[in-house]
Image: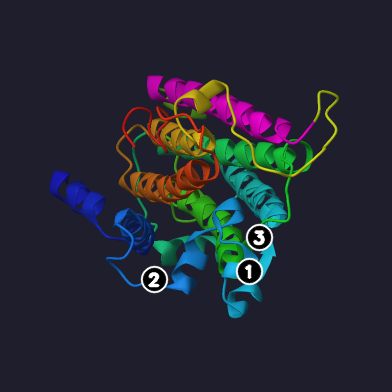
Amino acid sequence: MAAWAGAELSALTPLRALWLTLAAAFLLALLLQLVPPGLLPSCALFQDLIRYGKTKSRASLRPAVCLSFDVPKRYFSHFYMVSVLWNGFLIWCLTQSLFMGVPFPYWLHALLRILGTVQFRGGELALSAFLVLVFLWLHSLRRLFECFYVSVFSSAVIHIVQYCFGLVYYVLVGLTVLSQVPMDGRNVYVIGKNLLMQARWFHILGMMMFIWSSVHQYKCHVILGNLRKNKAGVIIHCNHRIPFGDWFEYVSSPNYLAELMIYISMAVTFGFHNLTWWLVVTYVFFSQALCAFLSHRFYQSKFVSYPKHRKAFLPFLF
């Protein structure tokens, strides 16, 4: 039995393979940015695909073909709209199954099986997955609120490929969470008669880390938004300025660092040992590190007085 469990743990499911591939792709992209300029030939399309917003080159310096694939950066709100609706639906399906014994829809169960879900029992995964799915939904709802009422978007753009990836991402990450639910056929398997019997110390720790990380990310987005407003809260410009306060005293992109911490809090909620979710965290780490590194370079190139002690992503390290 132990050997079977070990084999199951190490199985490379389609979901794990996908997240591993994404993590490797963003690691490679980050490493290529660390190579000194001139050692590798420049590729305009590659740079256009990994940069967005302020880190993109000015329109006059980009090939005309790249400009035709631009969409406004403010479309970020679409990602969170999709996430709130889709992951809200997944929460509803999981809640129905957990508390009312309603089986998952056939098509959803079939999709989860295709992605690599297996029939298994044990652990605290039912409560863990429920909490993580709720965290993901709350995170998306907050980010949607920030897009409408906190952030101040300029005329900055993103590539249409980045836009499509963002739409698919939150659908995929919700399915990843749901795939970790222990199943018995199309029904969720729950140890004992009460879901709360599965509560463990790491659920509380994960919840505390999620709240802490979310609060700091919100503060950072407020700081960035206020840079373009006057004291009365009226938008007066869309220029870039040096942000100060909270985690900005340590890194250039604390909002990206907080994003990583939010996903780590979910890994803690899963009990530290969920390999599939750690692959998601690995992807988030490299993708956010790449964005943070490009932003750090932008700030350094634009502001001569930019604080020398600030790192790009990880305080005191990188």
Q: Amino acid at mark 1?
A: Ser
Task: Residue at 63% x, 69% y: name it.
Answer: 60
Q: Which residue is mark 2?
A: 42
Q: Is residue 93 left or right of residue 192?
A: right
> Circle 2 — which element?
loop
Residue 75 visible here: yes
**Relative image position of residue 183 (x, y in whole percent):** 43, 49
Q: Nearer the viewer, residue 96 or 8?
A: 8
On screen, 128 above or below 88?
A: above
- Whether pointer 3 and pointer 2 mark residues with C-beta atoms closer than 8 Å, the reply is no
**Tag 1 or tag 2, which sits nearer the N-term?**
2
Q: Residue 45: x percent and y percent? A: 48, 73
- 290 vs 19, nearest the viewer: 290
- Classify 10 Å Cα crowding around label 1: few (below 14), some (14-19), many (20 and above): few
Badge 2 crowding class, 10 Å Cα cut-off, few under 14, some 14 to 19, many 20 or more, is few
Q: Residue furthest front?
A: 304
State the residue position of label 1: 60
- Amino acid residing under circle 2: Ser
Q: What's the CA distance linking mark 1 and mark 3?
A: 14 Å
**For the point 59% across and 25% down, which residue is it?**
215
Which secondary structure, mark 3? strand
Residue range of the region highlighted in magenta in the rendering: 201-229
> What main secondary structure does the magenta stretch of the protein show?
helix
Which sits earlier in the primary sequence, circle 3 or circle 2?
Answer: 2
What element does badge 1 sit on?
A: helix
Q: Is residue 25 above or below residue 180?
A: below
Q: Which label sits on residue 157?
A: 3
Instruction: Name the image quarter holding residue 278.
Output: top left
From mark 3 to mark 2, how far is it between C-alphas? 21 Å
Q: Earlier in the sequence, mark 1 or mark 3?
A: 1
